[in-house]
Image (spheres, grey):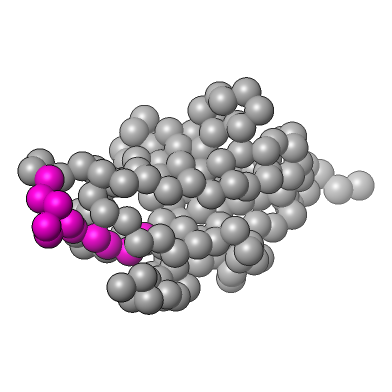
Amino acid sequence: MAQECVKFYQTYCISYEEHGYRPMQQSRNFKLAKGDFAQQELHLNNGQDYHISLAVDDVFAQQLFLQIIDTSSEDVLYDNTKDDMNLDLEFSAIKDVKAKIYIETHAPVIRDTLHEINGCIGLLIETRPTPPTGFLK
């Protein structure tokens, strides 16, 4: 059954390649049940822009909890519950940070272990050098 999620992020995630971004090897496809979670390690590098896009199977109703957490301090760098459950974000790293992306699906109202509801989630992580800003001499 895990095979049905192969190439999910490649097919359904919003890519910003036309803006100079390149996919990272940490991009992943997950097969999760309602109420499950997944994590992906990510090293954020100073001077790089990042675009993170999630694609979600209909069984999750486009509702995922997403956090980016600094693994050394456990500080939450981003929490989509404070951003209208956003599943598409872009940011610049201003220092090197070892981080993890934490994704959690909403739990079902009634958990039926005989008929567990599974779905695919695609995580596309893209990066590019931060464009220079300011005036050129």
Give the residue at x 50% y 62%: 28
Asked whether the viewer can see residue 86, the reply is: no
Region in magenta = 111-121
Q: Is residue 98 left or right of residue 89?
A: right
Where residue 20 appears, as percent x and y from the top left, is 66, 65
37 or 58, which lies in front? 37
- Quadrant occupied by the N terminus: bottom left
Q: Is residue 45 left or right of residue 79?
A: right
Where residue 100 appears, as percent x and y from the top left, is 56, 41
Asked whether the viewer can see residue 40, the reply is: yes
Where residue 19 appears, as percent x and y from the top left, is 61, 65
Give the residue at x 26% y 54%: 33
Q: Quadrant of residue 84?
A: top left
Give the residue at x 17% y 57%: 116
- How many labels sit on residues? 0
Q: Is residue 35 left or right of residue 11?
A: left
Q: Is residue 71 magenta?
A: no
Where residue 62 appears, as percent x and y from the top left, is 26, 53
In the figure, 67 relative to 7: above or below? above
Give the residue at x 12% y 45%: 111
